[in-house]
Image: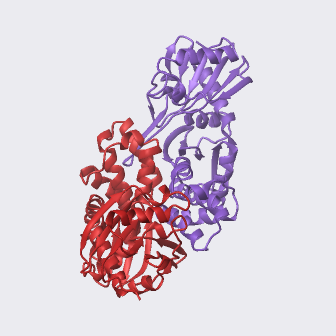
Chain colours: A purple, B red
Amino acid sequence: MRWTDGFIAADWGTTNRRAYRIDGEGACCEEFEDGKGILSVPAGGFPDAVAEIRSRLGDLPLLLAGMIGSNKGWQEARYVAAPAGINDLVQALVWPGEREAIVPGVSFQGDGRADVMRGEEVQLLGAVTAGDVPADALVCHPGTHNKWASVDGGQIAEFRTVMTGELFNLLKGHSILADLLKEDAQPDDAFARGVQHGLANEDLPSELFAVRARVLLGDAVAEDAPSYTSGLLIGTDVRIGLNGASASSIYVMGRPELTQLYAAALREAGREPIELDGEQSFLAGIREIAKRMP
Amino acid sequence: MRWTDGFIAADWGTTNRRAYRIDGEGACCEEFEDGKGILSVPAGGFPDAVAEIRSRLGDLPLLLAGMIGSNKGWQEARYVAAPAGINDLVQALVWPGEREAIVPGVSFQGDGRADVMRGEEVQLLGAVTAGDVPADALVCHPGTHNKWASVDGGQIAEFRTVMTGELFNLLKGHSILADLLKEDAQPDDAFARGVQHGLANEDLPSELFAVRARVLLGDAVAEDAPSYTSGLLIGTDVRIGLNGASASSIYVMGRPELTQLYAAALREAGREPIELDGEQSFLAGIREIAKRMP
């Protein structure tokens, strides 16, 4: 069933969803974003939530990715084991109805590790399809849970999650540092100092406390705390994510306000970041999945 | 003014306070604990909160330690710079009234670091005074903010805070791991595995995400998550706190439910933990301060 007359693509996450109407030529001609993530949908409410998308974008087939396929979503789409490419995703599509398909996530098990992604796989493989990421590359995908993915032969070969965004939000929302973290982080000098500390040291849960101690003792100004703390977390993340990788160019994909911070951190680490807009990569990936559907 | 006829000692923290009536011989003869930490006291309310302590334990002089001396407490008692001993605390006492004294905290600045403690100094120096900790020792003081203190010549020479307890509480209360962390951690096999990972690896913000991924992929059981996660955080904490120290015996001071976890982690690290009850050390310290008051 190839959806040659157009379809609706949706990136349906935990707290938000973004839907796009794709025409027969693969162009995106209408879209919307709202706060109806899967956690806001009541039990049994997904058919209505899907009907609402159609009422806004047209009575078309739907191709859904993200947490909508988790065990808290509409119907569970089990993880495809890495290495995984577009065809693996297509073959493991789950069909809640005849005109609705859900893209599975990807899992990695190996080296004593275990990891999962859901939603990022469409962007990663979409960027490869679009030629924005080469068939062999290291890709960083910042977000609540940053993903470092090794692309090998055009497939997601392995990956590692670092929960940097969530840790920053926890500290900002509920910790002893909350008062100091009200403003947004900027890629400024304080950010660079945090990055350098995180790249060179393995003391994150100690250095986080020092953020406040330095301000109390006059060794730092309170205004620098958001950028320094963000830099400390992202520098630690980059140290973990590079993990001895020799690639000089690193692809950084996601929302521009986040990719710019990771790009700045990668430059501090002596790498050349190449920033990509995650939304365009998502559209490239979802179109490729639709094109290859049986 | 030596309070030879007895006094009231209080360890007054952010969310709790514990008060003790100490008689003329230095024995503790009555005590209570309640949830009236400094954050629960309204502006201008400290005289009333102090009067309430006296109404319960007697009309005696008061010696207060902990966050009561912070900039959110009754009156700020500035940090005494390490190295600091009992006499340094006595000389920097702050007097909100003629019969009320507040013990200052201790700060450390050096090696590019900055750190503060407030409350733990009484316990640390009290344990030295009581002979429970030798004049040269490495002491670990678990809590919301775990302190690793080097005692040198009977003084607090330097120290480092690791915010392990707060991170665990943030994860338990507000993170994607919250569902998995409802139960208390135990020093069991899962805890030991977490400790070993934290001792040997520098990937905390990545391994935290793996806790959930392992359960989703069947590599771990959900029941092990609280102990494994606690072990991971405490193992990381011990790696940071030992920081190349060669001491074979490490003194672990605090509440017994916490010291037992750190003691188990230190054994995994090949050290011999010696557990001490923080409350007894506090009483020893506060008695010594009262005895030396001018």
Q: For residue A71, what is the image quadrant?
A: top left
Q: Position of residue A95 (x, y in %)?
A: 50, 16
Which residue sits furthest right?
A29
At horizontal 59% and vertical 65% (from top left) the residue drawn is A196
Which of A43 and B37 lies nearest the eye of the viewer?
B37
**In the rendered view of the protein, which quadrant contains the N terminus of chain B?**
bottom left
- Up-down relation of residue B281 to residue B210 (above or below): below
Q: Position of residue B255 (x, y in %)?
A: 30, 62
Q: Quick check: B249 left or right of A29?
A: left
Q: Quick check: A260 left or right of B243?
A: right
Which of A25 and A71 lies nearest the eye of the viewer?
A71
Q: Position of residue B250 (x, y in %)?
A: 29, 73
At horizontal 70% and vertical 44% (from top left) the residue drawn is A256
Q: Position of residue B14 (x, y in %)?
A: 45, 60
- Report if residue B244 is visible in the image: no
- Up-down relation of residue B284 to residue A223 (above or below): below
- Up-down relation of residue A215 to residue B209 (above or below): below
Which of A279 and B71 lies nearest the eye of the viewer?
B71
Q: Quick check: B251 left or right of A33?
A: left
